[in-house]
Image: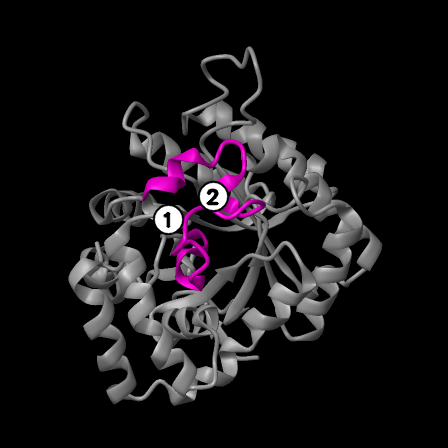
């Protein structure tokens, strides 16, 4: 396993990490989580990503139960959660969802700590931006959560570069803990934000990236070229918003063009896609997901592929994907 610093911090994350979106509670119970997290940890993974909204808080409960069963020293792993949407339950108050106001953030983190059974979280993220709450209010609340010892570092997820810089500048001005990291979607068919919009931030703020969806929700595995398979992520209740992208003919044609490249390298399409994201030195860690141990083991095989992604191979990958990437 390789390890990279998270932005300009001293914290080092495994280049591949394990996330819980969609899978934990919905497809992965505590027993399966223990099995996969143990295998991931044995392979060198030290970062486990979560969010308050995943499975309405149940994902945090499953991961927390797994941590207790595994009994690892707290210093040996890094865990995150993210905040904006709330728990998604019926009858939530106006200050409990779709917001980054101070009241919500302070209480939401307390809820996560209870569900995880932890005294602190290592990383906390603003899961989306909130145009109705002043960035100053959000940045100060995140600083205060760190001062109170409930979190160690804070960052954002899917924020614009302008909003991230505004939060960073406010923290710089007032001596608050600055946002350290962004969690953007980044894969072969979704590049612009990481490679262009955020480019000025890497040097000016020391921005680190914990990227998500390296497989484009499974599109880059090739399994959606014939439609939506039964039992796949695209077929799950609540995942309808993904289906148009998963069955897009142009995107699936690009996936088909990647197949011979992967075959020549002795890799799967998924391994090629993950290795490509990891190859970017701006990426601190690539968050992967798995509902079965075999998927986790296969994803880990991407690490051995990175050195074979020569400039010539990367050029061939670009030729197949750049024209339709957003």
Does the residue at mark 2 contact the one at mark 1 (Cβ under 8 Å)? yes
Pointer 2 local density, CA inside 10 Å: few below 14, some 14–19, many at least 20: many
Asked whether residue 269 appears in the rendered view, the answer is yes
Residue 75 lies, in percent from the top left, at 69, 63
- Residue at the spot 47% in from the left edge and 85% down from the top edge: 266
Q: Which sits in the foreground, 91 or 200?
A: 91
* Quadrant of the snapshot with the N terminus: bottom right
Of the numbered discs in the image, which one, if any, rests on residue 234? 2
Q: Is residue 158 above or below residue 303?
A: above
Q: Is residue 262 above or below residue 121?
A: below
Q: For residue 78, what is the image quadrant?
A: bottom right
Residue 289 lies, in percent from the top left, at 55, 57
Q: Is 69 left, or right, of 255 in this rendering?
A: right
What range of the chain is rendered magenta? 216-244
Magenta-span inclusion, residue 227: yes
Residue 48 lies, in percent from the top left, at 60, 57
Q: Is residue 60 above or below residue 38?
A: above
């Amino acid at each position: 396993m390789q390890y990279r610093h998270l932005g300009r911090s001293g914290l080092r994350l495994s280049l591949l990490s394990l996330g819980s979106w969609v899978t934990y509670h919905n497809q992965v119970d505590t027993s399966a989580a223990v099995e996969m997290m143990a295998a991931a940890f044995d392979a060198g993974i030290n970062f486990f990503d979560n969010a308050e909204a995943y499975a309405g808080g149940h994902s945090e409960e499953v991961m927390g139960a797994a941590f207790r069963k595994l009994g690892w020293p707290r210093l040996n792993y890094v865990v995150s959660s993210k905040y904006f949407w709330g728990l998604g339950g019926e009858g939530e108050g106006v200050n409990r969802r779709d917001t980054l106001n101070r009241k919500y953030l302070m209480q939401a983190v307390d809820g996560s700590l209870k569900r995880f059974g932890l005294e602190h979280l290592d990383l906390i993220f603003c899961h989306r931006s909130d145009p109705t709450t002043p960035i100053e209010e959000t940045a100060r609340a995140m600083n205060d959560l760190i001062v109170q010892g409930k979190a160690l570092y804070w960052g954002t997820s899917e924020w614009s570069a302008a909003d991230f810089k505004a939060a960073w500048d406010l923290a710089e001005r007032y001596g608050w803990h600055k946002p350290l990291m962004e969690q953007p979607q980044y894969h072969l068919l979704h590049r612009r934000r990481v490679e262009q919009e955020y480019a000025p931030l890497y040097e000016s703020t020391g921005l680190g990236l914990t990227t998500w969806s390296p497989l484009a929700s499974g599109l880059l595995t090739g399994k959606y070229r014939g439609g939506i398979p039964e039992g796949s992520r695209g077929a799950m209740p609540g995942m309808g918003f993904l289906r148009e992208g998963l069955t897009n003919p142009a995107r699936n044609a690009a996936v088909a063009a990647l197949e011979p490249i992967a075959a020549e390298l002795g890799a799967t399409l998924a391994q090629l896609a993950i290795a490509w994201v990891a190859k970017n030195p701006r990426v601190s860690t690539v968050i992967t997901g798995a509902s079965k141990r075999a998927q986790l083991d296969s994803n880990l095989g991407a690490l051995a592929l990175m050195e074979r992604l020569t400039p010539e191979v990367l050029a061939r990958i670009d030729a197949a994907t750049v024209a339709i990437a957003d």
